[in-house]
Amino acid sequence: MGVQMKALMKVARGKCNVQLKEVPAPEPAKGHVLIRVHVAAVCGTDVHIYYDRFPNSPPFVLGHEFSGVIESVCGDVESLRIGDRVVSANNPFACGTCAICLRGYPNLCSHKKAMGIHSDGCFAEYVSLPACLIHHIPDNVSFEDAALMEPLAVAVHSVWHRCGIEPDDFVVVFGPGAIGLLAAQVARAEGARDVLIVGTNRDEGIRFECARKLGIDTVNIEKDNLRERVMDLTGGEGPDVVVEASGSSSAIVSGMDLLRKNGRMAISGITGRPDVAIPWDQLVSKAVSLFFAYSSLNSDWQKALGFVSANKVKTSVLITHRFGIEQWKDSFGMLERLEAIRPVLVMQAAGDMPVGGRCN
Ligand SMILES: [Zn+2]
Ligand SMILES: [Zn+2]
């Protein structure tokens, strides 16, 4: 008889339809590893899936941000061993053979089924994933630090891989959620002269508090004059780089408006709208560069793990609340009310899996 595990599942399309279930633990296919989940973080995407505001493919186990330990390795996978502490990139089922995969961008493969969205994710005691996505956690990085490697890799992809930071860049980040707070740290780690993070009244609580803990200056556009502040700090020129991590159309427009001539914009925020009106002619006459970014690549994960190991980026500052998987509803609620940046589910395996267990 197979081992049973607890798993938080989106069981059907439509609002809610999320249930904590007792299901068989996955049996890894060849080339996959079975990972025992230690810490899993709850993200805004999970809440959007709960309300069915984000495209998803039920039934599946929710969750895509986690850290864990390898329980079994299936097939010849030389670099991974039982007991290794690991995290996983989120491009499962990318085919590796289509034109965009061959160009080195499996994050954009049409066959990809992101975990916790279109395939089984990590809000469970075990998750099975392809070995090619797995990265080792450095010894000096905790399971909690590592649980936020996915959002950090997304921030790294946008700021480092796509846009790039040059020494002495002045950077303005819109949106002090997890991605924004991590992107601001990436910009600083890459040598930015100064980083400002921009939000609204609703960010005055835990999000701005976290930014200040990290030594990042905050601007509330409902109270302060952002333009005056930025022009003061940049000799009237405007920021070299704007990072858009808010998904707000007004933030997108004000970021484009602030950007200096020849400036760069790193864009990862999704608006949930079919279109956004942008100041086209102004962007042309300023000759700015826009860098859109989606998901992340293995190289971003290596960079992200290096940043945390070198203490240049602090991820666990974003974790303020811990729950058992039974309290998943409380964790989703806190995130929705912006009382937490990244609540985490601390997973506990109910029973021991047979080490080196079955393969499919
Ligand atoms: Zn996420
Ligand atoms: Zn492909």
Image: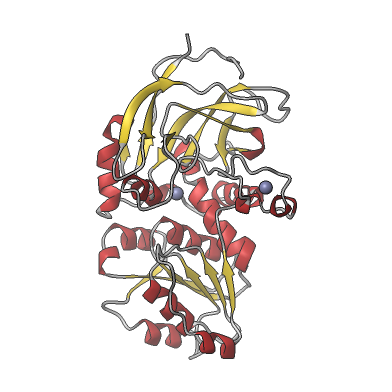
How far from the left and from the top, in percent, is residue 115?
A: 50, 40
Q: Which of 203 and 329 is in front in this view?
A: 329
- Which residue is depicted at the point 43% across and 50% down? 55
Specify the quadrant of the image occupied by residue 273: bottom left
Q: In this view, does 19 lie above or below 319?
A: above
Instruction: State the residue in front, 250 or 207.
Output: 250
- Residue at the (62%, 64%) spot, across then down: 162
Q: Using the image, determine if residue 231 lies above or below residue 138.
A: below
Image quarter of residue 134: top right
Q: Where is residue 90 in the image (x, y as percent from the top left)?
A: 55, 44
Of residues 237 and 46, the one nearer the viewer is 46
Whether residue 278 is visible to the viewer of this picture, yes or no, is: yes
Q: Which residue is drawn at 32% across and 29% down?
A: 20
Which quarter of the figure is the C terminus placed in?
A: top right
Residue 189 visible in this rendered orientation of the protein: no
Q: Which residue is drawn at 33% across and 59% down?
A: 207
